[in-house]
Every structure is written in C-alpha cells, then in structure tokens.
Image (spheres, grey):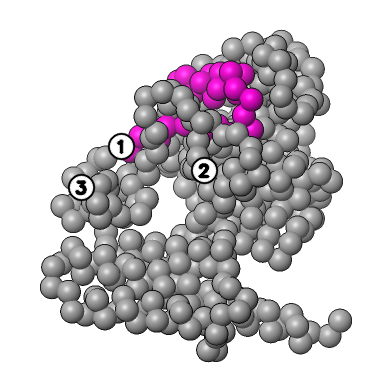
Amino acid sequence: MDPQGLSLVGSHVSQEHDSRLHPSTAAGNRRNTMGSSFIIFPPAKTQARRGEVRAQTLPVSASERAKRCAVISVIVCTRNRSRSLQKVLDSFSRIIPPLGGTWELVLVDNNSTDDSAQTIRRFAALAPMPVRCVFEPRTGLSHARNAGIGKAQGQLFAFTDDDVALDSAWLCELQKAFARFDCLGVGGRIIPVWDHPKPPWLVTDGPGALMDVVPAFELGPEPCQMKTAPYGANMAYRREAFEKYGLFRTDLGRVGTVPLAGEDTEFGHRLLSHGERVDYSPRAIVYHPVEKERTKKKYLERRYFHYGRTLAHIHGFPEDAVRYFGVPRYLARLAASSFGQWLVTLDSRRRFHHKLSLLIHLGEITEARHLSAEKTAHSTAPS
C-alpha cells in the first residue's frame, strides 16, 4: 500500500495485525486482537507516488538495499505529554526527507487524558508528510509501539520518544545505514541536554556510574557493528525483523507512570542472539532532555526497584532453585547482603550504591512472588 496517496479516513477498526506479526510475551506468542482506532492524513504537500517495497531475504545487492529503504515509517508513542510532544513534532517539520524515498509519521496516542489528541490532529492537518494517527486504549509503551507497527506502511520502522529534538539529518542517516549494510537494525546517537546543574553525587560514567538515569547512547565517532542493543529513543528496524522475531514484549516497558523498562533492548538482544546484524550510526542524532526529576535520589530508588522487576521478567529464575513463598533462596541472600552493606557503610556515595543494589533485589523478589502466584493460579485453574 502506498502511503502517499492516502485519503482522509476516520473509523474504529479491529486491531488485527498481519498474521506474521505476533507479540512475544513471557507466556508465549499471543495475537493482538484488541480494538484501536486510527486516522490517516494525506501530506499537506503533494509528493510523487511510489509503489510498495517488499521485504526480501538478506544478503542482497546494494541497489536492492536502496529500494528496500525507500518507504520509512517513523513511530512516536505518547501519553499525557502534549507539551513535550509539540516540541518533537516541531522538529519533524524541520526534518530532511530521506533521499530518493518517501516516509510517513505514525503518531500513537496511548489513551491520553490531556490534550495530546488535539495536538496530534492540529499537526497532522498541516504536516508536510503523511501522518497516521493511531489510538491504543491499552496503557503501556509496548502496546503503543506494537499498535504503531500494525498500522505502519513502511519497510523500515524508526522509533523515537515524545520528548526529544531531532537532528535535521536524522532520518537520512538512518536510511543511509540501512542502504550501506546488510543489517536488520540500526541504533543512533543520543545526546543528553541539561537545563539544570548535575548533582555532584550523580556519577554518569566511569567506575561507580549509575544505571542509564541520564538518557545517552554513544559508541564512538564512526559507524560500527553493534554488540549491544540500541535504545528506544533512537532505533530503527526493518519490517522483516518483526515478522521474523515478533513484536515488543507487552510484559516489559513503561506502563503509565510505572517505570518498567527493557522492551526496547530485549527486542534488540533477541535479534543479536539469533546472529542478526545491528549497526550503529553516529550521525543519526537525537537530543534528549534530562528531566530534573531523573536527577533526584527518590527517582533512582524507584527506577532501580522496577529494574529488578524487569530483570525477573527477562531472565526468569532457575527451575531448580530452592524457593520460600515463591522466592528463590539465593535472592533472599543477595538482598540480605546488600542490606547489611548499606547499614554498615559510612561513605554516603557507597552507601547509596548499596541501597540501590538492595532495591534491585527487592524488585526481583517482588516479581518472583508475583510470577509464582500467577503460575500457581494457572496450574490450579480448571481446564
């Protein structure tokens, strides 16, 4: 389907993904059948019509790679952040279109209760590119991204956040990386933008660096093949990556104000673990603000607790582990050790690190009990 010659449509539709697209969850692959509504806006400026580009098996020639990069869908999900959303939409207005190709913007409203829907519609009515407006009623970043994928028409899917500023060449650089390499995914550079002083206790690099509190991603000045997964604020994948390996796990990722994480990196590691190639493009740049809230200790404590929950979801626990009330015994020992170190340490920085370590283990313990209860309920439920 051509994203350029689209008419104005407004309807409630069943969210029926292509049969090849299936979300991978801890409980197995489940088809997404919940309803979502969407509106397609044509571009404000007429552009040349282009045919559909079909995904093909790698490796392919350079000319064929270029064809496969011709149609790009940029997917942005938002929930109750209309002010920051307006800023990223403004930067889309200044984006340089991909060379020799066409693109569309897919805006997913994840059940917002503020004026995000109005912000999206105002932008879409005047946008110089085709805009697809999707409403996803199930709260959660993974649900929203999967809904965007289900409605996108491109052969390349680029993802970014609803609070960033984009370099004007961002889209072109992602396209170049796909055209240059036989890769299934591309990660770009994320540069943090500070509008307030960094607290002296907040260590962001070197020994004792705290975990990804400041949104940043950089692997050097030159393109390279990645051995780690890109971050959700600046990542792109071919359509076939989702056809082959499933969608983002819906048991991971932010849900409302609960800072679960890992849906983006889990998907990237899923590809890497199967030997797929993901490349780094240092000139595909997004600028990510560092919210003042992220630099408060209370935020870090909450983030580390939910990071422990995320680890439990991604890695699970050994089946043969000795458990008490659903909690592996070794986790209780790790938590007790961190608690003891936190109590006896006098240095404030090291003491805080021990507290964060304890919170990770408490998050794992919390999720272990939850998963154990779910498993028990499932096993005792009548068939």
Work out whether residue 321 or residue 325 is closer to the camera in this orientation and state it.
Answer: 321
* Distance in Å between CA atoms under marks 1 and 3: 11 Å
* Location of the C terminus (image quadrant): bottom right
**Place of residue 110 in the rendered image (x, y in percent of width and height, measured from the top left):** 60, 51
Residue type beneath disc 3: Lys
Q: Which residue is drawn at 77% across and 34% down?
A: 9
Which residue corresponds to mark 1? 193
Total tally of numbered discs in the picture = 3
- 333 displayed left or right of 201: right
Q: Give the range drawn in magenta.
A: 166-193
Can see residue 95? no
Mark 2 or 1, closer to the camera = 2
Q: How crowded is mark 1: few (under 14 residues within 10 Å), some or many (20 or more)?
A: some
Q: How crowded is mark 2: few (under 14 residues within 10 Å), some or many (20 or more)?
A: many
Q: Can residue 18 be seen in this view?
A: yes
Q: Is residue 9 or residue 275 the one in the foreground?
A: 275
Q: Is residue 64 left or right of residue 230?
A: right
Amino acid type at image mark 2: Ala
Most extreme residue toward the front is 320
Q: Quadrant of residue 34?
A: bottom right
Residue 129, quarter of the rendered image? top right
The percent position of residue 375, horizontal first and vertical second, equals: 68, 79
Quick one: which residue is furthest to the left in this view?
Answer: 346
Q: Position of residue 353 (x, y in %)?
A: 26, 65
Q: Residue 229 carries which label?
A: 2
Q: Mark 3 points at which residue?
A: 198
Label 3 sits on a secondary structure element that is: loop
Q: Compared to 345, does 99 lie above or below?
A: above
